[in-house]
């Protein structure tokens, strides 16, 4: 009888890897990624340790959910990445970069992988569908050994707007960033959350309604990223440079427009491709590449954002806009999107225990800075440090140090190195804080603890 | 347990003689002190007022009224009462309870959020109550740390309460980023008398008195999670503000647009030869900016009068001096820059009101506030045009259409909004037509936005 049943199952066996095999074969590729991130609560800034799931995806490459690098409430970049492997082995890692739309980040492993660890290989030919059983390997709490657990769920919905993705009934609670397997043991994607799939999804997709269903970022998206991981500071996404809102059916009716969707240009950012093309506040974009724009509610804005973002730097975008009641054609040549704060250059000074980063486009918007404003932004101040005692705070924008104007972190580095040589004991910073400027004196004995 | 307590008491009795048997000097001293306290109490108590205003709150997107309790003190025999702005500055209706428990109505004469003071006038037209006698003011420039003081008022609405302590410090500086519950900036022009006499919510607006029964401060703040940290507005500040309010309903101040910081450890860096006040920021398009004053300049003389601020405690006085400059009359400002002295002449402007009036846009489901010059500076707006959305009512048309607090309404339909009054008129006019929809355009973080209100009216 035993032989018979084995025979009967014979055809399916190679496919049906079974949950146990998934666990046994892949748990070694799961690492616990720890790092430090700054948070601010009631004017107090403190460092907290983050712990997330990492997946080994290459000989020195680990993938994590992008929330790890965007999670700081102060805009500081996380640091001190460490990878904890199943056997207790620990490796340092450095941050490579993040893909904004998939919200997936990559780390480079320092000192090579442990011998028995095999990178996970994503399979983009598995074509997962609603109803399929799926499995994830998640992390157990820190003090539990072994650290990996297996959870089972199902694909429960297949959504196509604002972009296609699969919803599961798996909780992201302890499996955010976990690899997702199908019943055949193929790695079909990673588990992400509704709120984090793209820049404009946060307010538009259920995260605020308390929905914690995990979604699958599929292998089609991941494979190219693994092959060529995004690098910090590298501009890949294109941008138009407008703030926008959806043309709802009610608004279209109010303005007597025939269109069933469109983009209202709320502002045109200075220096952007939109500004160069002559787009204006109040324009309504109703067609792109000759096709209508299917955005008739705020939730669907990401459709347009994705269309622009993925078109590529240098792409020509013919638009039809309605301006003052008449239709006009406008062609925009897309340019690289400005750097985000996660990609900004940083500099840490061990004597002052101070970290600054370069100002990025978003800072100019957030702080209402003039286009010719120059400075560096304080991203970290160690508690009890010389800079903290002197009164520097996270978020301050340093415009000058003594008589030197600062435009980049490298400028600060140079001036501080000079000051260290001369052992200047008093440093006078001219900073902008909450829209007001002031002078801040920082004393130091140049007894750097690095 | 009781045995233990008895033992402890017995133990102390055995070790020390009972108090009565101690030195006569100590007993006589304490009796003298007690007499002084009674006398001081009797001088101020008849002027003490329990203030219960009905104040509107627009922050929820609808006008909501509530009655609050604070304290006050009669400062003139004809019935003027001083209290805090945060108690009665926005009041629509005020009930005062006098020391003899008589209730009297009062009217708001005026208020000043920047010093957190308001003046009421008791209305005896409907009352047979005995008129209270005004309290006397003391000189707050001549106070001593350690001086005995009493605070009177209605802590947690417990009227006619007296607490006592000492002056903990005479010139406490508190950062001026503090805001009143109604949103106004406050505390720029004065330091505080700090006291350990118990000050609790409800004490606000009540007097801090010396042992001669003179009002030396108006109790206005306390650290709530701390013990015995109360703060009073010095009487000399109160006197000046109150006089102005009684005379004209308000106090006018001048403004030149400089922010300053203490010079203290920066003297060397700026080669300060003779003190001065260090300019840390200059407001865009202000008289100071137009005159060429920049951060890093050391103001040495204003209108021929020397100015200095080495420490934080000296900064409010500098701002007060600027505030007293006559508006629209040139003033000479001498300043030091890079070691050399310069003089500029500039024309101060009116400081103006902290905030504009409030208005409930009832059928549209939100509240708005007029925009003043001070709000332009604070919110970094381009100009005073438009009205600020101060609240959005849950479930209203505005909330459904996506309006947010802090949005600035720029257009209603095709009409540009210039100010609150014009907005009110336009709202009345538009509402008469009973429209089904109203399109408004707002400014939200430097970006415009259309908000289509669905009102369910009959007109298409």
Image (spheres, coloured by chain):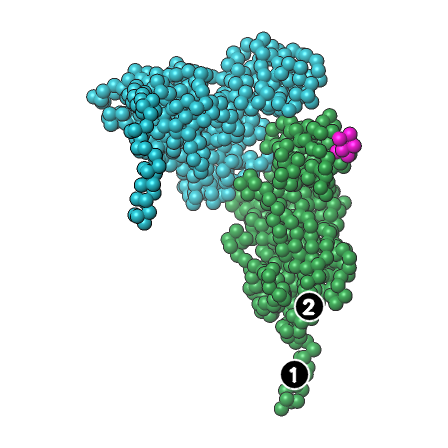
Can you name the residue that lies furthest to the top here?
B304
Can you name the residue that lies furthest to the front here?
B14
Residue A341, placed above or below residue B141: below
Mark 1 sits on what residue?
A: A9
Q: Earlier in the sequence, mark 1 or mark 2?
A: 1
Of badges 1 and 2, the one in the foreground is: 2
Q: What is the spatial separation of the Cα atoms under label 1 and label 2, in whole angstroms?
A: 24 Å
Residue A404 position, x and y percent, is 74, 28
Residue at 37 percent of width and 20 percent of height? B210
- Tell me which chain appears cyan: B
Residue A276 shows in the view: no
Residue at 24 percent of width and 25 percent of height? B100
> What is the span of residues highlighted in magenta in the rendered image?
A415-423
User: Going by the image, does B35 lie left or right of A171?
Assistant: left
- Tell me if mark 2 has few (under 14), some (14-19) or many (20+) residues whose alpha carbon lies within 10 angstroms of its own: many
Provide the major secondary structure of the magenta segment: helix
Chain A shade in the render: green
Chain letter for the residue marked with disc 1 in the picture: A
User: Going by the image, does A15 lie left or right of B49?
Assistant: right
User: Going by the image, does B25 lie left or right of A131?
Assistant: left
Comparing A226 with A81, the one in front is: A81
Residue A437, placed above or below residue A356: above
Mark 2 sits on what residue?
A: A26
Residue A145 position, x and y percent, is 62, 65
Residue A107 position, x and y percent, is 72, 54
Residue A32 position, x and y percent, is 66, 59
Residue B268, placed above or below residue A29: above
Residue at 60 percent of width and 18 percent of height? B277
- Looking at the rendered structure, the secondary structure element under dot 2 is helix
């Amino acid at each position: 009888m035993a032989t018979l049943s084995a025979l009967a199952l014979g055809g399916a066996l190679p496919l049906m890897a079974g949950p146990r095999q998934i666990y046994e074969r892949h748990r070694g590729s799961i690492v616990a990624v720890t790092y430090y991130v700054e948070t601010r609560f009631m004017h107090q800034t403190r460092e907290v340790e983050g712990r997330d799931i990492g997946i080994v995806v290459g000989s020195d490459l680990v993938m994590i959910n992008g929330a790890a690098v965007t999670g700081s409430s102060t805009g500081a970049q996380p640091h001190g990445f460490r990878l904890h492997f199943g056997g207790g082995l620990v490796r340092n890692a450095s941050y490579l970069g993040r893909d904004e739309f998939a919200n997936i980040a990559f780390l480079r492993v320092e000192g090579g992988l442990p011998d028995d660890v095999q990178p996970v290989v994503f399979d983009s030919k598995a074509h997962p569908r609603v109803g399929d059983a799926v499995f994830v390997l998640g992390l157990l709490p820190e003090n539990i050994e072994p650290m990996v657990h297996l959870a089972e769920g199902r694909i429960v919905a297949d959504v196509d707007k604002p972009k296609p993705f699969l919803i599961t009934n798996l909780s992201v609670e302890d499996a955010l960033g976990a690899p997702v397997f199908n019943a055949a043991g193929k790695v079909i994607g990673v588990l992400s959350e509704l709120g984090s799939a793209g820049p404009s999804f946060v307010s538009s997709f259920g995260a605020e309604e308390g929905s914690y269903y995990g979604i699958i970022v599929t292998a089609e998206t991941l494979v190219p990223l693994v092959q060529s991981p995004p690098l910090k500071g590298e501009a890949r996404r294109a941008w138009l440079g407008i703030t926008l809102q959806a043309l709802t059916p009610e608004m279209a009716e109010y303005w007597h427009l025939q269109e069933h969707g469109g983009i209202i240009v709320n502002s045109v950012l200075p220096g952007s491709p939109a500004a160069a093309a002559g787009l204006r506040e109040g324009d309504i974009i109703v067609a792109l590449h000759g096709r209508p724009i299917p955005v008739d509610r705020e939730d669907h804005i990401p459709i347009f954002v994705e269309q622009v973002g993925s078109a590529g730097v240098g792409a020509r975008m013919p638009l039809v806009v309605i301006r003052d009641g008449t239709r006009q054609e406008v062609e925009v040549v897309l340019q690289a999107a400005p750097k985000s704060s996660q990609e900004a250059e940083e500099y840490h000074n061990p004597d002052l225990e101070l970290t600054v980063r370069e100002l990025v486009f978003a800072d100019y918007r957030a702080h209402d800075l003039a286009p010719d404003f120059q400075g560096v932004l304080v991203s970290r101040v160690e508690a009890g440090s010389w800079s903290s005692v002197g009164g520097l705070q996270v978020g301050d924008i340093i415009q000058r140090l003594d008589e030197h104007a600062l435009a980049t972190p490298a400028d600060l580095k140079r001036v501080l190195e000079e000051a260290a040589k001369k052992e200047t004991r008093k440093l006078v910073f001219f900073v902008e804080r909450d829209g007001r400027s002031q002078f801040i004196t920082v004393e130091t004995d140049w007894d750097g603890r690095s | 347990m009781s045995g233990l307590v008895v033992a402890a008491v017995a133990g102390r009795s055995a070790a020390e003689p009972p108090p009565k048997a101690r030195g006569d000097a100590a007993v006589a001293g304490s009796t003298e002190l007690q007499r002084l306290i009674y006398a001081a109490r009797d001088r101020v108590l008849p002027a003490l007022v329990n203030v219960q205003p009905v104040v509107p709150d627009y922050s929820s997107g609808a006008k909501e009224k509530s009655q609050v309790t604070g304290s006050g003190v009669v400062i003139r025999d004809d019935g003027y009462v001083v209290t805090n702005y945060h108690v009665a500055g926005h009041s629509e209706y005020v009930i005062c309870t006098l020391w003899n428990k008589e209730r009297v109505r009062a009217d708001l004469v005026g208020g000043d959020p920047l010093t957190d003071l308001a003046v009421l006038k008791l209305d005896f037209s409907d009352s047979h109550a005995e008129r209270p006698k005004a309290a006397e003011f003391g000189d707050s420039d001549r106070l001593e740390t350690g001086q005995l003081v009493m605070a009177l008022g209605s802590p947690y609405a417990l009227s006619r309460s007296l607490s006592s302590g000492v002056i903990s410090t005479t010139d406490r500086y508190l950062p001026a980023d503090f805001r009143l519950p109604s949103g106004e900036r406050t505390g720029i022009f004065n330091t505080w008398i700090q006291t350990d006499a118990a000050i609790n919510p409800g004490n606000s607006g009540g007097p801090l008195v010396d042992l001669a029964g003179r009002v030396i401060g108006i109790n206005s703040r306390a650290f709530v999670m701390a013990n015995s940290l109360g703060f009073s507005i010095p009487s000399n500040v109160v006197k000046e503000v109150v006089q102005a309010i009684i005379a004209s309903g308000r106090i006018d101040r001048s403004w030149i647009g400089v922010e300053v910081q203490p010079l203290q450890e920066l003297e060397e860096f700026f080669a300060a030869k003779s003190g001065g006040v260090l300019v840390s920021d200059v407001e865009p398009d202000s008289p100071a900016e137009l005159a060429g004053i920049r951060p890093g300049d050391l103001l040495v003389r204003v209108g021929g009068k020397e100015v200095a601020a080495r420490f934080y405690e000296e900064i409010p006085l500098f701002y007060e001096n600027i505030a007293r400059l006559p508006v629209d009359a040139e003033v000479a400002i001498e300043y030091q820059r890079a070691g050399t002295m310069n003089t500029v002449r500039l024309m101060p402007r009116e400081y103006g009101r902290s905030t504009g009036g409030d208005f409930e846009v009832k059928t549209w489901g939100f509240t708005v506030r007029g925009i003043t010059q001070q709000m332009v500076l604070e919110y970094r707006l381009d100009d005073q045009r438009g009205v600020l959305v101060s609240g959005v009512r849950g479930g209203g048309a505005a909330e459904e259409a996506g309006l947010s607090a802090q949005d600035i309404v720029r257009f209603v339909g095709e009409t540009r909004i210039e100010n609150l009054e014009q907005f009110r008129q336009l709202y009345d006019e538009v509402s008469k037509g009973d429209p089904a929809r109203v399109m408004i355009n707002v400014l939200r973080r430097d970006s415009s936005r259309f908000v289509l209100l669905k009102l369910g009216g009959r007109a298409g």
